[in-house]
Amino acid sequence: MKRRNPMISHWLAPLALLFLVLSGCSSPQVVNRFAADTGYKGAVNLPYDRKLGLDLDVYYPPQASAAPVIVFFYGGRWTLRDKSEFEFVGQALASRGFVTLIPNVRKYPDVRFPEFVNDAARALRWARDNAATYGGDPDKLFVMGHSSGAHIAALLALNEEYLKKVGGSRAWLRGMIGLAGAYDFMPITAPDLRDLFGPVDRFQYSQPIFYVDGRNPPLLLIHGRNDEVLSVSNTENLARSVAKAGGPVETVIYDSLSHNMVIGALASYLRGRADVLDNIEEFVVRISKQPRSARRQLDLRATPLQQDDVDGVEAQPLPTPEPVPDSEPVTPMLLTPVPASSP
């Protein structure tokens, strides 16, 4: 049998992966196959809530010591995916010196909003309590997410009620990183999402933008204008709202990146496509070194937002957001299958 030239295989692999990601045909598990498998350690299926059967995976540099800690929540329309599909994210962040935790949270239709955010808060508590075991510094704790996972991360950073329920506060967080996130997506029209976030009079509580008060930890919001799943207006609107309230927020907006590619660019073979990982690293390292009292003004990169309604506007105090009501029992409903690139 004719042997394949390894140089050709090495050249074709990133092109094949790029095609799969751009076409929306790939699951994260496919991207995992192209991720580097050296340079980091892992501990998988660690329980953070035994009663609910919830666990997480940890990826960390072999010689980590007092390293920043990132808790990453994956996307999947609040209904799909598993932490095992995002090994490439753990590898990417560990390769830059960060202890990375990727939890599973409960999903719809087993639970409705806000139960999966409450799960995320418990995972954050576990990260804070156990980060030092893996060389992490609990005082350098960041929350990060993609798509619907960024929605969860943003709620933890903007609505302190979730962390209060687990004995904490937003003071736990050094920063939040959102990739192509769902922050301002009303009106909610899809039948499954109306059930997930319902009843109608509670829809506003599902929107991270609703909780902006200017007292958030620093935010880094990354999005692509070529996003076919979640409009870039989610990031633009949240950034403007936080800036007006006097909170620290930065944005990186790419003209050509799709919804899948914003997260796919973290994979080792695709990092040349966009500097998403570089921007995350710079933000985490810089913020980790800053005193907690340091505050930053809006800093826009890549394609600038229109700031006519930001510059020169004095920040006004906003009313204290109401706590999110506890969810009520729900009878599960059948879902229409959703595409792999759903939020």
Image (spheres, rainbow, N blue to C red):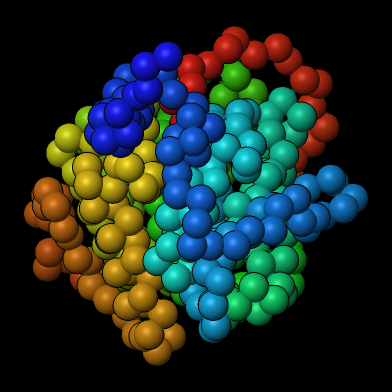
- Seen at 22% across and 42% down, the residue is 273
- Seen at 48% across and 68% down, the residue is 98
Residue 281 picture quarter: bottom left
- Seen at 38% across and 70% down, the residue is 284
Q: Is residue 206 visible?
A: yes
Q: Is residue 247 visible?
A: no
**Looking at the picture, how far across and down is residue 163, in whole percent?**
65, 65
- Between 88 and 251, which is closer to the camera in this rendering? 88
**Looking at the picture, how far across and down is residue 235, in whole percent?**
31, 46
Report the number of numbered marks: 0
Residue 232 falls left or right of residue 56: left
**Looking at the picture, how far across and down is residue 127, in whole percent?**
66, 67
Residue 182 falls left or right of residue 328: left
Up/down of 182 relative to 290, above or below? above
- Between 9 and 207, which is closer to the camera in this rendering? 9
Quadrant in which the N terminus appears = top left
Residue 62 picture quarter: bottom right
Up/down of 48 relative to 126, above or below? above
- Seen at 26% across and 30% down, the residue is 8
Residue 14 picture quarter: top left
**Looking at the picture, how far across and down is residue 324, in whole percent?**
64, 50
